[in-house]
Image: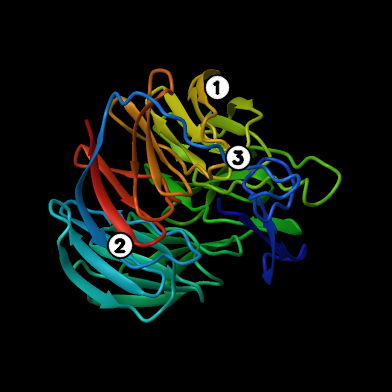
Protein backbone atom coordinates (compact mmCIF):
# COMPACT_ATOMS: atom_id res chain seq x y z
CA UNK A 1 0.00 0.00 0.00
CA UNK A 2 1.36 3.39 -0.94
CA UNK A 3 0.70 6.38 1.27
CA UNK A 4 -0.48 9.73 -0.01
CA UNK A 5 1.78 12.69 0.68
CA UNK A 6 0.65 16.08 1.91
CA UNK A 7 2.47 19.35 1.39
CA UNK A 8 2.15 22.43 3.56
CA UNK A 9 1.54 25.55 1.50
CA UNK A 10 1.36 29.24 2.41
CA UNK A 11 -2.05 30.85 2.34
CA UNK A 12 -0.64 33.95 0.66
CA UNK A 13 0.48 32.12 -2.44
CA UNK A 14 0.95 28.77 -4.17
CA UNK A 15 4.52 28.11 -3.01
CA UNK A 16 4.98 24.68 -1.45
CA UNK A 17 7.28 23.84 1.42
CA UNK A 18 9.43 20.76 1.54
CA UNK A 19 7.88 19.41 4.76
CA UNK A 20 5.61 16.45 4.03
CA UNK A 21 3.11 14.52 6.13
CA UNK A 22 1.95 10.98 5.44
CA UNK A 23 -1.71 10.13 5.01
CA UNK A 24 -2.88 6.64 4.19
CA UNK A 25 -4.94 5.93 1.11
CA UNK A 26 -8.01 5.23 3.28
CA UNK A 27 -10.89 7.67 3.51
CA UNK A 28 -10.40 9.03 7.03
CA UNK A 29 -7.62 11.16 8.51
CA UNK A 30 -5.69 8.38 10.28
CA UNK A 31 -1.94 8.72 9.75
CA UNK A 32 -1.34 5.02 9.17
CA UNK A 33 2.36 4.24 8.73
CA UNK A 34 1.99 0.53 8.03
CA UNK A 35 -0.36 -2.31 8.73
CA UNK A 36 1.38 -5.50 9.76
CA UNK A 37 0.35 -6.46 13.28
CA UNK A 38 -0.05 -2.94 14.67
CA UNK A 39 -3.03 -1.91 16.84
CA UNK A 40 -5.65 0.17 15.03
CA UNK A 41 -4.10 -0.43 11.62
CA UNK A 42 -6.25 -1.67 8.76
CA UNK A 43 -4.80 -4.62 6.87
CA UNK A 44 -5.21 -4.86 3.08
CA UNK A 45 -7.67 -7.48 1.91
CA UNK A 46 -6.29 -10.87 0.98
CA UNK A 47 -7.04 -11.86 -2.58
CA UNK A 48 -9.97 -14.23 -2.93
CA UNK A 49 -10.05 -17.26 -5.18
CA UNK A 50 -12.44 -17.20 -8.13
CA UNK A 51 -13.23 -19.18 -11.25
CA UNK A 52 -11.42 -17.59 -14.19
CA UNK A 53 -13.69 -16.71 -17.07
CA UNK A 54 -10.86 -15.00 -18.97
CA UNK A 55 -7.07 -14.97 -19.01
CA UNK A 56 -4.41 -12.25 -19.31
CA UNK A 57 -1.63 -12.99 -21.78
CA UNK A 58 1.68 -11.10 -21.98
CA UNK A 59 2.37 -10.15 -25.61
CA UNK A 60 5.76 -8.62 -24.81
CA UNK A 61 7.73 -7.20 -21.88
CA UNK A 62 10.33 -4.40 -21.88
CA UNK A 63 12.47 -2.60 -19.29
CA UNK A 64 12.33 1.19 -18.84
CA UNK A 65 14.03 1.65 -15.45
CA UNK A 66 12.50 2.36 -12.05
CA UNK A 67 10.07 5.23 -11.59
CA UNK A 68 11.29 5.99 -8.07
CA UNK A 69 8.91 7.99 -5.89
CA UNK A 70 7.00 9.45 -8.81
CA UNK A 71 4.19 8.17 -11.04
CA UNK A 72 5.32 7.80 -14.65
CA UNK A 73 3.25 6.68 -17.62
CA UNK A 74 4.18 5.71 -21.18
CA UNK A 75 3.00 7.73 -24.18
CA UNK A 76 1.52 6.18 -27.32
CA UNK A 77 1.80 7.37 -30.91
CA UNK A 78 0.70 5.67 -34.12
CA UNK A 79 3.80 3.48 -34.36
CA UNK A 80 5.74 3.82 -31.14
CA UNK A 81 5.71 3.93 -27.34
CA UNK A 82 7.80 6.38 -25.34
CA UNK A 83 8.65 5.63 -21.73
CA UNK A 84 10.89 7.14 -19.07
CA UNK A 85 12.62 6.16 -15.86
CA UNK A 86 12.91 8.35 -12.80
CA UNK A 87 16.66 8.77 -13.25
CA UNK A 88 16.30 10.29 -16.72
CA UNK A 89 16.34 7.55 -19.36
CA UNK A 90 13.92 8.20 -22.23
CA UNK A 91 13.20 5.20 -24.45
CA UNK A 92 11.37 4.62 -27.73
CA UNK A 93 9.83 1.17 -28.14
CA UNK A 94 8.20 -0.48 -31.12
CA UNK A 95 4.49 -0.99 -30.45
CA UNK A 96 4.14 -4.40 -32.09
CA UNK A 97 7.18 -6.15 -30.60
CA UNK A 98 8.43 -4.20 -27.57
CA UNK A 99 11.82 -3.81 -29.24
CA UNK A 100 13.90 -0.86 -28.03
CA UNK A 101 14.54 1.54 -30.92
CA UNK A 102 16.56 4.16 -29.07
CA UNK A 103 17.38 5.30 -25.55
CA UNK A 104 18.76 8.68 -24.47
CA UNK A 105 19.91 10.06 -21.13
CA UNK A 106 18.11 13.40 -20.75
CA UNK A 107 20.15 14.57 -17.77
CA UNK A 108 17.35 15.33 -15.28
CA UNK A 109 15.34 13.41 -12.70
CA UNK A 110 12.02 12.78 -14.43
CA UNK A 111 8.95 13.48 -12.29
CA UNK A 112 6.26 14.01 -14.94
CA UNK A 113 5.61 12.24 -18.20
CA UNK A 114 5.64 10.97 -20.73
CA UNK A 115 3.53 13.09 -23.11
CA UNK A 116 3.56 12.84 -26.89
CA UNK A 117 1.88 14.45 -29.88
CA UNK A 118 2.42 16.79 -32.83
CA UNK A 119 5.87 15.25 -33.38
CA UNK A 120 7.05 15.93 -29.82
CA UNK A 121 7.94 13.69 -26.89
CA UNK A 122 7.63 15.56 -23.58
CA UNK A 123 8.92 15.04 -20.05
CA UNK A 124 9.05 17.19 -16.92
CA UNK A 125 11.61 17.28 -14.14
CA UNK A 126 11.73 17.71 -10.38
CA UNK A 127 13.33 21.16 -10.75
CA UNK A 128 10.70 22.48 -13.15
CA UNK A 129 12.50 21.58 -16.38
CA UNK A 130 10.37 20.73 -19.42
CA UNK A 131 12.13 18.94 -22.27
CA UNK A 132 10.76 18.35 -25.77
CA UNK A 133 12.34 15.74 -28.04
CA UNK A 134 11.50 14.78 -31.58
CA UNK A 135 10.50 11.23 -32.40
CA UNK A 136 14.10 10.33 -33.23
CA UNK A 137 15.34 11.26 -29.77
CA UNK A 138 16.86 14.66 -30.58
CA UNK A 139 16.28 17.55 -28.19
CA UNK A 140 14.05 20.21 -29.78
CA UNK A 141 13.90 22.64 -26.87
CA UNK A 142 14.14 23.00 -23.12
CA UNK A 143 12.00 25.27 -20.98
CA UNK A 144 11.35 25.85 -17.29
CA UNK A 145 8.22 26.25 -15.18
CA UNK A 146 7.78 27.48 -11.61
CA UNK A 147 8.21 24.19 -9.72
CA UNK A 148 8.45 20.42 -10.14
CA UNK A 149 6.35 18.81 -12.85
CA UNK A 150 4.30 15.98 -11.32
CA UNK A 151 1.94 15.12 -14.19
CA UNK A 152 2.08 14.39 -17.90
CA UNK A 153 2.75 17.43 -20.14
CA UNK A 154 0.05 17.63 -22.82
CA UNK A 155 0.21 19.07 -26.33
CA UNK A 156 -2.69 20.29 -28.48
CA UNK A 157 -3.20 23.00 -31.09
CA UNK A 158 0.48 23.97 -31.05
CA UNK A 159 0.53 24.49 -27.28
CA UNK A 160 2.32 22.36 -24.67
CA UNK A 161 0.40 22.56 -21.39
CA UNK A 162 2.42 21.88 -18.26
CA UNK A 163 1.11 21.72 -14.71
CA UNK A 164 3.60 22.31 -11.90
CA UNK A 165 3.44 21.17 -8.29
CA UNK A 166 2.54 24.65 -7.03
CA UNK A 167 -0.79 24.54 -8.88
CA UNK A 168 0.22 26.74 -11.80
CA UNK A 169 -0.50 25.74 -15.41
CA UNK A 170 1.71 27.09 -18.19
CA UNK A 171 1.02 27.12 -21.92
CA UNK A 172 4.26 26.82 -23.89
CA UNK A 173 4.78 27.28 -27.62
CA UNK A 174 5.20 23.80 -29.09
CA UNK A 175 7.70 25.16 -31.63
CA UNK A 176 10.25 26.63 -29.21
CA UNK A 177 9.07 26.20 -25.61
CA UNK A 178 8.51 29.90 -24.94
CA UNK A 179 5.70 30.68 -22.53
CA UNK A 180 2.45 31.82 -24.13
CA UNK A 181 0.25 32.06 -21.03
CA UNK A 182 0.09 31.24 -17.33
CA UNK A 183 -2.81 30.27 -15.09
CA UNK A 184 -2.35 30.50 -11.33
CA UNK A 185 -4.52 30.49 -8.25
CA UNK A 186 -4.07 30.55 -4.47
CA UNK A 187 -4.04 27.25 -2.61
CA UNK A 188 -5.24 26.16 0.86
CA UNK A 189 -2.79 25.86 3.74
CA UNK A 190 -2.66 22.07 3.42
CA UNK A 191 -2.86 20.27 0.09
CA UNK A 192 -2.28 16.74 -1.16
CA UNK A 193 0.89 16.42 -3.20
CA UNK A 194 -0.58 14.63 -6.17
CA UNK A 195 0.00 13.78 -9.82
CA UNK A 196 -3.23 15.44 -10.96
CA UNK A 197 -2.89 16.66 -14.51
CA UNK A 198 -5.27 17.84 -17.22
CA UNK A 199 -7.70 16.37 -19.70
CA UNK A 200 -8.00 18.01 -23.12
CA UNK A 201 -11.18 17.75 -25.17
CA UNK A 202 -11.92 19.78 -28.31
CA UNK A 203 -9.49 22.59 -27.53
CA UNK A 204 -10.51 22.86 -23.87
CA UNK A 205 -8.30 21.80 -20.94
CA UNK A 206 -10.08 20.59 -17.79
CA UNK A 207 -8.13 20.62 -14.52
CA UNK A 208 -9.01 19.94 -10.90
CA UNK A 209 -7.40 21.74 -7.98
CA UNK A 210 -6.98 21.83 -4.22
CA UNK A 211 -10.17 22.74 -2.39
CA UNK A 212 -12.29 20.78 -4.88
CA UNK A 213 -12.26 23.32 -7.72
CA UNK A 214 -12.72 22.30 -11.38
CA UNK A 215 -11.68 24.71 -14.14
CA UNK A 216 -12.19 24.69 -17.92
CA UNK A 217 -9.80 26.82 -19.96
CA UNK A 218 -8.95 27.38 -23.61
CA UNK A 219 -5.82 25.60 -24.76
CA UNK A 220 -4.85 28.44 -27.11
CA UNK A 221 -4.67 31.29 -24.59
CA UNK A 222 -5.42 29.90 -21.13
CA UNK A 223 -8.57 31.96 -20.73
CA UNK A 224 -11.04 30.51 -18.24
CA UNK A 225 -14.37 29.39 -19.71
CA UNK A 226 -15.91 28.38 -16.39
CA UNK A 227 -15.06 27.33 -12.84
CA UNK A 228 -17.06 25.30 -10.35
CA UNK A 229 -16.75 23.52 -6.98
CA UNK A 230 -16.83 19.74 -7.12
CA UNK A 231 -16.49 19.45 -3.35
CA UNK A 232 -16.54 21.77 -0.35
CA UNK A 233 -14.03 21.26 2.51
CA UNK A 234 -15.65 19.80 5.63
CA UNK A 235 -14.40 19.11 9.15
CA UNK A 236 -12.87 20.83 12.15
CA UNK A 237 -9.15 20.52 11.41
CA UNK A 238 -7.20 21.46 8.30
CA UNK A 239 -6.38 17.78 7.77
CA UNK A 240 -10.07 16.87 7.85
CA UNK A 241 -10.90 19.78 5.54
CA UNK A 242 -8.69 18.57 2.71
CA UNK A 243 -10.92 18.06 -0.31
CA UNK A 244 -8.52 18.13 -3.25
CA UNK A 245 -9.01 16.81 -6.78
CA UNK A 246 -5.93 14.61 -7.06
CA UNK A 247 -6.62 12.90 -10.40
CA UNK A 248 -7.36 13.93 -13.98
CA UNK A 249 -10.96 14.81 -14.84
CA UNK A 250 -12.65 12.65 -17.49
CA UNK A 251 -14.58 14.15 -20.38
CA UNK A 252 -16.46 13.45 -23.58
CA UNK A 253 -18.27 15.82 -25.97
CA UNK A 254 -21.15 16.31 -23.52
CA UNK A 255 -19.93 15.92 -19.95
CA UNK A 256 -16.89 16.40 -17.76
CA UNK A 257 -16.61 14.60 -14.43
CA UNK A 258 -14.17 14.92 -11.53
CA UNK A 259 -13.70 13.36 -8.11
CA UNK A 260 -12.15 14.75 -4.92
CA UNK A 261 -10.34 13.03 -2.08
CA UNK A 262 -12.45 13.28 1.09
CA UNK A 263 -15.14 14.82 -1.11
CA UNK A 264 -17.52 14.08 -3.94
CA UNK A 265 -17.74 12.86 -7.50
CA UNK A 266 -19.66 15.19 -9.80
CA UNK A 267 -20.46 15.64 -13.49
CA UNK A 268 -21.05 18.88 -15.38
CA UNK A 269 -22.12 20.10 -18.78
CA UNK A 270 -18.81 20.36 -20.64
CA UNK A 271 -19.68 23.55 -22.50
CA UNK A 272 -21.24 25.62 -19.72
CA UNK A 273 -20.10 23.99 -16.48
CA UNK A 274 -23.66 23.64 -15.20
CA UNK A 275 -24.02 20.82 -12.64
CA UNK A 276 -25.71 17.57 -13.64
CA UNK A 277 -25.32 15.44 -10.49
CA UNK A 278 -23.01 14.74 -7.56
CA UNK A 279 -22.43 12.02 -4.96
CA UNK A 280 -20.39 11.64 -1.79
CA UNK A 281 -17.62 9.31 -2.96
CA UNK A 282 -13.93 9.91 -2.15
CA UNK A 283 -11.02 8.95 -4.39
CA UNK A 284 -7.37 9.87 -4.74
CA UNK A 285 -6.85 7.63 -7.80
CA UNK A 286 -9.33 8.66 -10.49
CA UNK A 287 -11.83 7.38 -13.02
CA UNK A 288 -12.40 6.31 -16.58
CA UNK A 289 -15.37 7.17 -18.77
CA UNK A 290 -16.87 4.82 -21.35
CA UNK A 291 -20.01 5.87 -23.16
CA UNK A 292 -22.80 5.84 -20.52
CA UNK A 293 -20.66 4.63 -17.63
CA UNK A 294 -18.10 5.90 -15.12
CA UNK A 295 -15.69 3.44 -13.51
CA UNK A 296 -13.64 4.53 -10.49
CA UNK A 297 -11.44 3.28 -7.65
CA UNK A 298 -12.47 4.89 -4.38
CA UNK A 299 -10.27 5.81 -1.41
CA UNK A 300 -10.77 2.40 0.23
CA UNK A 301 -9.74 0.47 -2.89
CA UNK A 302 -13.25 -0.54 -3.99
CA UNK A 303 -14.01 -0.48 -7.72
CA UNK A 304 -17.37 1.14 -8.57
CA UNK A 305 -19.43 1.46 -11.75
CA UNK A 306 -21.78 4.47 -12.00
CA UNK A 307 -24.38 5.57 -14.52
CA UNK A 308 -22.91 8.68 -16.19
CA UNK A 309 -26.23 10.43 -16.61
CA UNK A 310 -27.53 10.01 -13.04
CA UNK A 311 -24.63 8.92 -10.83
CA UNK A 312 -26.49 5.84 -9.61
CA UNK A 313 -24.41 2.82 -8.63
CA UNK A 314 -24.53 -0.12 -11.04
CA UNK A 315 -22.17 -2.33 -9.04
CA UNK A 316 -19.40 -2.18 -6.44
CA UNK A 317 -16.55 -4.63 -5.85
CA UNK A 318 -15.15 -4.25 -2.30
CA UNK A 319 -12.75 -7.19 -2.44
CA UNK A 320 -9.67 -5.01 -3.13
CA UNK A 321 -10.06 -3.12 0.15
CA UNK A 322 -6.94 -1.10 1.06
CA UNK A 323 -4.88 -2.62 -1.75
CA UNK A 324 -4.05 0.85 -3.12
CA UNK A 325 -6.15 0.09 -6.18
CA UNK A 326 -5.11 2.22 -9.17
CA UNK A 327 -7.53 3.99 -11.49
CA UNK A 328 -9.41 1.56 -13.75
CA UNK A 329 -9.35 1.09 -17.50
CA UNK A 330 -11.84 -0.68 -19.74
CA UNK A 331 -11.10 -3.30 -22.37
CA UNK A 332 -13.99 -4.92 -24.18
CA UNK A 333 -16.17 -6.68 -21.62
CA UNK A 334 -13.76 -6.00 -18.77
CA UNK A 335 -12.70 -3.34 -16.26
CA UNK A 336 -9.00 -3.66 -15.42
CA UNK A 337 -7.24 -2.34 -12.29
CA UNK A 338 -3.81 -2.82 -10.73
CA UNK A 339 -2.75 -2.86 -7.08
CA UNK A 340 0.22 -2.27 -4.79
CA UNK A 341 1.52 -5.85 -5.08
CA UNK A 342 1.60 -5.76 -8.87
CA UNK A 343 -1.55 -7.78 -9.47
CA UNK A 344 -3.64 -6.82 -12.47
CA UNK A 345 -7.32 -7.67 -11.98
CA UNK A 346 -9.93 -8.14 -14.68
CA UNK A 347 -13.52 -7.48 -13.57
CA UNK A 348 -16.71 -8.05 -15.48
CA UNK A 349 -18.14 -4.77 -16.80
CA UNK A 350 -21.61 -6.22 -16.28
CA UNK A 351 -21.49 -6.94 -12.54
CA UNK A 352 -17.94 -6.31 -11.23
CA UNK A 353 -17.08 -9.92 -10.41
CA UNK A 354 -13.46 -11.08 -10.84
CA UNK A 355 -12.81 -12.75 -14.19
CA UNK A 356 -9.02 -12.74 -14.61
CA UNK A 357 -5.81 -11.99 -12.70
CA UNK A 358 -2.08 -11.83 -13.41
CA UNK A 359 0.96 -10.93 -11.27
CA UNK A 360 3.39 -8.40 -12.77
CA UNK A 361 6.75 -7.20 -11.44
CA UNK A 362 6.27 -4.05 -9.35
CA UNK A 363 3.39 -2.00 -7.99
CA UNK A 364 0.87 -0.68 -10.53
CA UNK A 365 0.17 2.97 -9.73
CA UNK A 366 -1.30 4.30 -12.98
CA UNK A 367 -4.31 3.16 -14.96
CA UNK A 368 -3.48 0.75 -17.79
CA UNK A 369 -3.70 2.25 -21.29
CA UNK A 370 -5.60 0.77 -24.20
CA UNK A 371 -3.34 -0.36 -27.06
CA UNK A 372 -3.99 -2.52 -30.11
CA UNK A 373 -6.94 -4.49 -28.67
CA UNK A 374 -5.03 -4.90 -25.45
CA UNK A 375 -3.42 -3.00 -22.60
CA UNK A 376 -0.13 -1.26 -21.85
CA UNK A 377 1.00 -1.25 -18.20
CA UNK A 378 4.06 0.37 -16.63
CA UNK A 379 4.99 -0.73 -13.11
CA UNK A 380 6.84 1.25 -10.47
CA UNK A 381 9.83 -1.04 -10.96
CA UNK A 382 10.06 0.12 -14.57
CA UNK A 383 8.67 -2.94 -16.32
CA UNK A 384 6.49 -2.26 -19.35
CA UNK A 385 3.95 -4.89 -20.40
CA UNK A 386 1.77 -5.29 -23.44
CA UNK A 387 -1.11 -7.60 -22.51
CA UNK A 388 -4.26 -9.01 -24.00
CA UNK A 389 -7.22 -10.60 -22.25
CA UNK A 390 -9.11 -13.52 -23.71
User: Residue 108: where, in percent of width, then height?
Assistant: 41, 78
The circle on residue 222 is: none
Q: Residue at x 56, y 71 (%)?
A: 147
Q: Pointer 2 and pointer 1: residues touching (CB < 8 Å)?
A: no
Considering only vertical position in the picture, is 231 above or below 95?
above
The residue tagged 1 is: 311
Q: CA distance from mark 2 to mark 1?
A: 35 Å
Which label sits in the foreground, 3 or 2? 3
Nearer the observer, 371 or 388: 388
Q: Residue at x 53, y 45 (%)?
A: 324
Query: Which quarter of the picture shows residue 263?
Result: top right
The residue tagged 2 is: 83
The residue tagged 3 is: 299
SS state under label 2: strand
Q: Is residue 252 visible?
A: yes
User: Residue 83: where, in percent of width, then height?
Assistant: 30, 62
Which label sits in the foreground, 3 or 1? 3
Amino acid sequence: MISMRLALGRRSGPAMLSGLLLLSGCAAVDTVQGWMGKPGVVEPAKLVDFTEAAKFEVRWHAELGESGATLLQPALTADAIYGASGDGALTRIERATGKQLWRVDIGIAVSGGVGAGEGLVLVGGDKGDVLAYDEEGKLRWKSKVSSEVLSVPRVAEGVVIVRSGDGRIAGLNAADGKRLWLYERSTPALVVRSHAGMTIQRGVAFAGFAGGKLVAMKVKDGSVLWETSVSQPRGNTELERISDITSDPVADDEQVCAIAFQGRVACYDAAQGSPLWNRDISSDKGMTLLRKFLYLSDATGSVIALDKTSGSTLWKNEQLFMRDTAAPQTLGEYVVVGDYEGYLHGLSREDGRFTARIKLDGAIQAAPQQMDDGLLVQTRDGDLYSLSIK
